[in-house]
Image: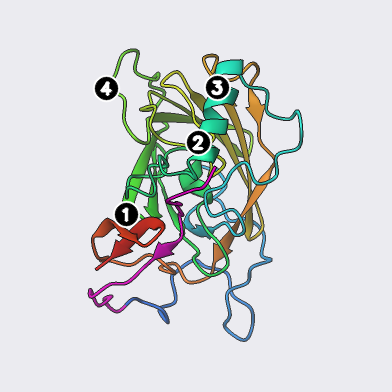
Amino acid sequence: MAMTKSFAIAVLCLTSVTAQAQWVNYRVPGVPRTPDGKVNLTAPVARTPDGKPDLSGTWESRGYFGNLGKDLKPGELVMQSWAEAQVAENQRNLHKNDPMVACMPPGVPRVDLGGSQGMPHPMKIVQTPSLIVLLYETSTNQTFRQVFLDGRPLPTDPQPTWLGYSVGRWEGDTLVIDSTSFIDTTWLGRGGLFHSDQMHVVEKLTREGNQIRYEVTVEDPEVLVEPWVMTTRTLRLNPNSEGGLLPERGNCEVYELKNITSQIRH
């Protein structure tokens, strides 16, 4: 069948907004350094006053660009039959229903793995004993998540949101984040992988030197026959604490040019 229009997620980041100066050369107190003054990326993991591993900093993933199904092997992701048909339809439509194309937030856990070599899309972690804040720079917008560590349970019947609701706990040196109550319009990857509003995401973050081992399990009984335990990914520390996080960005708008539907900033 001839395709009259194709769709792409390629992003043109054209902006008339001038980025404000950042503290590129400022030496953040408490950051371990080598004798020549460079950040020591192999130093032992720092700990907070309460003894927990310090996850603070700006972290980047490379190679996925939000496509969490990139490493999928045959039979690794088992979906309900109707869901498999929907994924196939999404692929035939060349991802035109991907919310990122429409300048919407990437969703969880896609937002944590949105970077590529040429477009890092960093995540900044701000850590306190009772709350962790995740700040995101994505191709579509800037957004954030709150992870409560004060012992509260997940809400029982909240208004669903793009990034859901999250609570966390420490299991040894691993931060475990439980998240639910997502709207069902975000995707898990560019392969048309979608989810329902019953999705439950468990993320595990373990700092190992200048890296975070990032493990994810997705449960969604409406879409998946069994939980999807994703391939372990790696987040790498950016020694510049402000690296990649722009204080301002232009508006993201959908545009069409010949046979491509994508997004543009101006």
Label located before the other in sequence (1 or 2): 2
Q: Name the residue under label 3.
A: 83
Cα separation between marks 1 and 2: 26 Å
Q: Are marks 4 and 2 in contact (CB under 8 Å)?
A: no
Q: Given the image, on which type of amino acid does mark 4 rest?
A: Gln
Q: Mark 2 points at which residue?
A: 90
Cα separation between marks 4 and 3: 24 Å
Cα separation between marks 4 and 1: 21 Å
Q: Given the image, on which type of amino acid does mark 2 rest?
A: Asn
Q: Name the residue under label 4.
A: 159
In this rendering, the answer to whether 200 lies above or below 237 is above
* Residue 188 in sight from this viewpoint: no
Cα separation between marks 3 and 2: 10 Å
Q: Name the residue under label 1.
A: 142
Q: Given the image, on which type of amino acid does mark 3 rest?
A: Ala
Q: Residue 252 location, x and y as percent? A: 27, 58
In this rendering, the answer to whether 57 lies above or below 205 is below
Tell me the number on the disc at residue 154: none
Decide if residue 239 is on the left or right side of residue 131: right
Q: Are marks 1 and 2 in contact (CB under 8 Å)?
A: no
Look at 41% across and 62% down and name the residue there. 11
Q: Residue 146 location, x and y as percent? A: 36, 38
* Span colored in magenta: 1-21
In this rendering, the answer to whether 63 lies above or below 97 is below
Give the prevailing secondary structure in the magenta stretch: loop
Decide if residue 239 is on the left or right side of residue 22: right
Q: Which of marks 4 and 3 is in front?
A: 3
* Residue 191 in sight from this viewpoint: yes
Secondary element at tag 1: strand
Label located before the other in sequence (4 or 3): 3
Image quarter where the N terminus lies is top right
